[in-house]
Structures are given as C-alpha cells and as structure tokens.
Image (spheres, coloured by chain):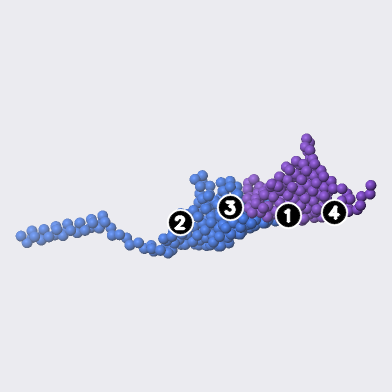
Chain colours: A blue, B purple
C-alpha cells in the first residue's frame, strides 16, 4: 500500500513539474525593457548615411561628426553636418552647418545656426550663406526667413528670406534684395 | 555718363523687393520697385530680367514697367531721361533700346516713337523704325542759351 502511495505521489509531482516547465516555455516572463523611457536611446560618432533612390542613385548623403537620438520626441541631434543633396539633374548641392536636428519622420532637418550652401556651376562656385534653415530632404527644398547672401564670380546678392528648390535649381530671395555685379 | 568707358566698367547695383534665379536657364528675375544704377545711369521699373553674369559681367538687362524709366548725365554734363514699356540696356555697348510708348528727353528736346535707341556713349538718339512715325519737339536755341533772338 505504501509503495503504491509513494508511486502515486511521484507521478503527481512529475506531472506538476512538467506542467510548470511547459507553462514557462509557452509564456516566457515579460522581458524588462532596458531602454530609457526618455532621453538618448542611441548615439554614434563619425556617421555617413546615404539615402538611395529606387533608381539606385543617391538622393542625399548625411555626414555628421556625431549623432544622438532622443525619445520620446524621436529627434536625431547631429553635430558638424555636411548634407549633400543629389538632384535628379544637375550638380549636387552641399549644406554645411555646425548643428542640426533631424525631426521625427526623417524628412525635415532643422539647422538653427549658420548654414553655408554651395554648388559648383559652369562659371564657378555659387555660395549661399544664411542661417536658421529648414531643409526638406525629400523635396530637396530649403527655407529661411533670415538674411541670405548669394555670391559667385563677380556678383553678390543679398535678401531677407530664402526659398531654395535644389531639385529644380531655383533660388528665391524673398524681400529687400540688394545686389552688385562687378567685373 | 560722364566718362563712358569708366561708366561701362562701373559696378552695376540692383535693388528690388524679390529675386528669383533659375540656374538651369541662367536667368535672374528681379521684381517689385526695381532700381538699377551704374555710375550716373539709373533705370527704374517693375520687373527686370538679367542673363546669368559671366564673372560679374552683365550682358543684357531688360526692364519692364508701366512705364519703365531711365535717367543719366551725358558726356557733356547734360541731363537725359526716357520712358518706355520695355527697356533693354546693354552695358558693354552702353546702349538703351526703348520699346513701346518710348520717349526720350535730351537737352530739352523730346522724341516720341514706338522704338528709340539711345546711345549713351555718343549721346545719340535714333528714333523710329520702318513704317512707324516719330514725333520730335525741339526747344528753340535761344530758349536754351537765354540770349535775345535778333530777326
């Protein structure tokens, strides 16, 4: 009788252990997230990011000395940035600035400080100096309300406010334009 | 302009409300209160179109307005002015072509035609074109010199 009872206990014990093991396999305990709820959740140094078009040609290249991504705002903070936009036609346009934020959605780059925009042209380099620029890297446009100065071989054009459409290579100075052409 | 060679090499200053530069076409458009100055030449109008400069040299400036106007001082120091719907200024040739309701006033004489070419360098007015009439008003010499006219 005792042997029978011992044997029954062992079977019950084994069943309970098996059930517990199966349960643990089927319903693993929730992994405790190690990500911070807010603040920097990743960072990197010496970054070069190239976005390609479906045609296989580059659309833009973002080079930064360092970046840090913060949540929950989903903003990527960049330092010492060289952003090169590759229009479908024509030569690329390069924007250089010390600090920028790539906003959530990955479409808009905000450049609060001074921005130097350059583009090689047949008659020499065209250079635009301005500040507080918002760049849409998909439409390849740039906008600011700040003073913008366009210089090239023999000319200097300054105005308040800029709309640059680098896909179509059209630059507009919006107000109070003054220019000098000098041989 | 007083010394036309120097004037033709003088820097060209342009101010306006708005500027648009179409790089592929090589065309710049100024609009809104456009003022062009070079040495003593002043051209004013509503819209100005320029061809992209090659090393600072502007080849042709086209000003339109209702009406566009220019003023300058001739090589002999006299005032000259003009108006038209459209003006084409060639800095190298030192020449202004006035088109549409064109009028030039030079030393008191007035010329009106559909087309007038004013040669800044030589202070010459060439008014009219085949099949077009011109109207010229000359101020009597005495009126200009102020001396009594003896019959």
Give the residue at the far left of this rendering: A1
Tell me the mark number nearer the camera, choosing from 1 and 3.
1
Residue B90 position within the rendered picture, expressed as x and y whole percent measured from the top left = 75, 48
Tell me the mark number nearer the camera, choosing from 2 and 1.
1
Distance of label 2 from label 1 (alpha carbons): 48 Å
- Which residue in the structure is indicated by mark 1? B37
Subunit of mark 3? A
How packed mark 1 is, by other alpha carbons closer than 10 Å (few <14, some 14-19, many 20 or more), is some
- Count of numbered badges drawn on the protein: 4
- Which residue in the structure is indicated by mark 4? B76
Q: Are marks 1 and 3 in contact (CB under 8 Å)?
A: no
N-terminal label among 3 and 2: 2
Secondary structure of the residue carrying numbered label 2: loop
Q: Are marks 1 and 4 in contact (CB under 8 Å)?
A: no
Distance of label 3 from label 4 (alpha carbons): 46 Å
- Which residue in the structure is indicated by mark 2? A104
């Amino acid at each position: 009788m005792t042997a029978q009872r011992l044997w029954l206990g062992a079977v019950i014990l084994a069943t309970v252990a098996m059930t517990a093991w199966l349960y643990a396999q089927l319903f693993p305990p929730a992994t405790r997230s190690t990500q911070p709820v807010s603040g920097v959740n990743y960072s990197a140094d010496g970054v070069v990011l190239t976005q390609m078009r479906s045609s296989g040609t580059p659309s833009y290249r973002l080079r930064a000395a360092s970046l840090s991504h913060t949540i929950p705002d989903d903003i990527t903070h960049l330092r010492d940035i060289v952003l090169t936009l590759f229009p479908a036609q024509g030569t690329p346009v390069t924007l250089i600035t010390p600090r920028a934020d790539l906003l959530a959605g990955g479409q808009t780059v905000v450049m609060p400080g001074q921005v130097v925009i350059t583009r090689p042209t047949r008659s020499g380099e065209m250079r635009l100096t301005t500040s507080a620029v918002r760049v849409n890297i998909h439409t390849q446009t740039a906008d600011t309300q700040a003073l913008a100065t366009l210089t090239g071989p023999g000319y200097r054009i300054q105005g308040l406010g800029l709309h640059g459409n680098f896909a179509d290579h059209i630059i507009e100075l919006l107000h109070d334009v003054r220019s000098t052409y000098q041989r | 302009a007083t010394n036309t060679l120097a004037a033709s090499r003088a820097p060209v200053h342009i101010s306006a409300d708005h500027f648009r530069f179409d790089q592929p076409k090589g065309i710049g458009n100024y609009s809104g209160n456009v003022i062009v100055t070079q040495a003593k030449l002043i051209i004013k109008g509503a819209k100005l179109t320029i061809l992209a400069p090659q090393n600072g040299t502007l080849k042709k400036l086209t000003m339109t307005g209702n009406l566009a106007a220019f003023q300058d001082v001739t090589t002999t120091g006299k005032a000259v002015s003009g108006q038209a719907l459209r003006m084409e200024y060639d800095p190298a040739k030192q020449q202004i072509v006035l088109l549409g309701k064109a009028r030039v006033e030079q030393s008191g004489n007035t010329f009106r035609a559909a087309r007038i070419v004013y040669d800044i360098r030589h202070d010459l007015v060439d008014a009219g074109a085949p099949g077009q009439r011109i109207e010229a008003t000359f101020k009597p010499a005495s009126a200009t010199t102020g001396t009594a006219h003896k019959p």
